[in-house]
Image: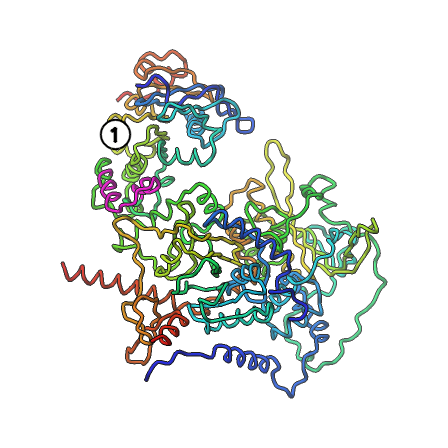
Amino acid sequence: MKGYNFAYLDEQTKRMIRRALLKAVAIPGHQVPFGSREMPLPYGWGTGGIQVTASVLGENDTLKVIDQGADDTTNAVSIRQFFARTAGVRTTTHTAEATVIQTRHRIPEETLRENQIIVYQVPQPEPLYRLEPSRVETKRMHALSDYGLMHVKLYEDVARLGQISISYDYPVMVNERYLMSPSPIPAFDNPKMHQMPALQLFGAGREKRIYAIPPWTDVRSLDFDDHPFRPINAHQPCGLCGATDSYKDEVITDDRGGRMFVCSDTDHCERRRAAA
Amino acid sequence: MNEQPIIEARGLTLSFGTIPALRDVDVELYLGEILAIVGESGSGKTTLLNVLSGQQQPQSGIVTYRDPAGAAHDVHAMPAPMLRTLQRSDWGFVHQDPRRSLRMNVSAGGNVGERLMAQGARHYGEIRTQALDWLQQVEIDADRIDDLPRTFSGGMLQRLQIARTLVTHPRLVFMDEPTGGLDVSVQARLLDLIRSLVARLGVAVVLVTHDIAVARLLGHRLAVMQRGRVVETGLTDQVLDDPRHPYTQLLVSSVLQA
Amino acid sequence: MAYVAVKGGERAIRNAHAWLAEERRGDPAVPDLGLDQIREQLGRAIDRVMAEGSLYDPDLAALAIKQAQGDLIEAAFLLRAYRTTLPRFAHGRPVDTAAMRASRRISAIFKDLPGGQTLGPTYDYTHRLLDFELAENQPPPDAPRAAPDASPLPRVPDILGREGLLEADGPADAEPGDLTREPLSFPAGRDVRLQALARGDEGFLLAMGYSTQRGYGGSHPFAGEVRMGEVSVEIEPPELGFAIDIGDLTVTECQMVNQFKGSKTQPPQFTRGYGLVFGFSERKAMSMALVDRALRAEELGEDVTAPAQNPEFVLYHSDNIEATGFVEHLKLPHYVDFQSELQNVRRLREAVERREAAE
């Protein structure tokens, strides 16, 4: 792409972002403010993830971009094209082949390896935002480990509904210190974050925060001992590949209530079908 | 009672602009004891409470707190996280207006359970059992446990605040006019409750009030404040039955005889 | 019918862009819009796009407006994205608005003042009657001419300041913050607040400013001065050691004079609200000055009760490029999370049914 640096961002900006990433990795789950730049995609559409990917991407990387678990959803296509044009890196739809995976709202079913980086797009980095809109207040709460607001919310859920009723963006405790938003992945995906071999990086462009979970870190979903965290998933198997343990999308097939369930992770589903 | 005071202040001085709120104030409190600080509004008693509890910085003087191990800590030199932890566990603060400490959009049970969860309690059933127990101790009907405080009367709110504060068995509790603004009969019931809870738990209490009758009922010792100074101090009955300082005499004589 | 996974996202996007290009062009029989036409004849749109795009370049703004089909927020977004790629080679010195070659200069607090009241090319006293003659593309009659008045235009704050009636402005030597390099953090200094307001959405600032006039916060504002005209941009290259003029900007500046109650130690003074915007953007400059003053509430010892006085509320929501991105992102697929919510609700309903059946 004429006139633009490798992966669009200038080197100073990448350096600034990498410094933020290093700080984030050193303090797992802690939100690090960074000077997010305006990107050619709108805020809220993955600019944070794009800036993080652009800062860690090298010529020899292989990039996979997914949205809702699929490589072919429109925004994943748009972002993959952006990097193809500005960085010319190899792209892939196969999780196992990728060295950098940028994702919106899902973690791939396949267990990631130590030499992989997964970059999450984050709309709202502050796990307490629905309970306390003021950032000045939440910053103090994180600094003092004062998470009472979240504890009472979980208590209230059980008291009112008999169970914790959070189904996505389920808050986690990282390294037993920081309360963190895992981004709006379904609660089903939370366990994958715990002791993951890969490096997990999180970018929120509009809110201008970066955070990270280094490999092999404890990540626990908040719960009660007698109301343990239970991931939600459809109990039907995948109508295409038969998988019972993958996260499934519900597809309406006719207007008489017909429906089927299909793996959300398209690469996972294709490989299962190819192997069958 | 221990030999060392659980909290001790020496030479506290603080002015707001040109108005002196505290003038060279000394105070000490022992475990298991209730110290009542009385004075009219403007006497500096609430400021004293705020300085003792670390919420306001004095311009000179020192507040020393002794932890369960006996170690002494300068309250105003403590790092913020340490003070915060103290305020959430070993200490309690009962506000005159319970809405200041209660979460009005959280159920009674959630309000009582919060400090337990902040200390690491992770078993919902046990948290709820303790909350029920405490509601009973402050004479709130058990079936109100899931109700929002919005539906509670003034007296009930105050009792809920007390439950929320005492649930972690703090050693030291600060109370700011705990019965202020309540009906006389409601006050009496609340005072009885406070007295029996404090006696049973062996808590040390600094109680601020403008009401001599409250001081007499609850306080073991009394400190009388006027315009930022402690003008008289001693055992409650002694001070009230035989006031030495003219201001104390004025306060005592202006109380309506029951 | 067997389910076949839908593919073809790439092709759909390409087709969408092709259709967009045709929509943008409109009827091919109609002459294509020239950038010079946009620049010359849609000046207020140009000004708004430069202000919110945070980039002073009328030609680029014209291109952005054409590319965005007249959607001014989209056009500002284009300029912002372009701005990200530009290298910085110097910092300008603060523009000297006292030395402005003003086309327009009015004050609502003095009937007359040194330099006089000059209306300039204002809409203020037009009657809002649609002028159908404009559709006929006739040249306008020549406006009367006079020699430009070179007398100095002292700033109204300086006039009031001489008697000590208006608070002094803050220290001028501190290095200002830069929101385009560092993220916003609180407490936010006035420099960063003003920067956020200068690039903030005009509609949002208008509403916030309006709210202060209707009782949501509010400080009895008077329009001390509004001036619009050209100021020089100067840089001081280290090799030269003196300042050189590299060009002109048209800006609009508004000084609001607000009331303040004095205290026992401070005699009463008027307080300031300030607005400065690219182009001929009076509505924005005045709104900005109202909001600037509202955000100073805490500094001036006033109770913070209204949205316009709450820095977090105003500054986090004033950037329309951030706002439109996030609002519109709701169009992106959210079916994975929705699926979790569906399962959640189904599970909760089952639990209720089981409980009711048991009773």
Q: In this view of the protein, can residue C190 be seen by the observer?
A: yes
Q: Is residue A159 left or right of residue C82?
A: left
Q: Is residue C219 above or below residue C8?
A: above
Residue C289 x, y percent position in the rendering: 63, 53
The residue that mark 1 highlights is B197
* Residue located 28% across and 20% down the image: B257
Q: Is residue B122 left or right of residue C320?
A: left
Q: Furthest residue to the right?
A: C147
Which quadrant of the rendered structure holds the N terminus of chain C? Answer: bottom left
Depth check, front residue: B101 or C268: B101
* Most common SS among magenta residues: helix
- Where, by quadrant of the figure, is residue A258 drawn? bottom left
Q: In this view of the protein, can residue B37 be seen by the observer?
A: no
- Secondary structure under tag 1 reads helix
Q: Chain of mark 1?
A: B
The answer to whether residue C323 is magenta is no
Q: Is residue B258 above or below residue C30?
A: above
Coloring basis for residues = rainbow
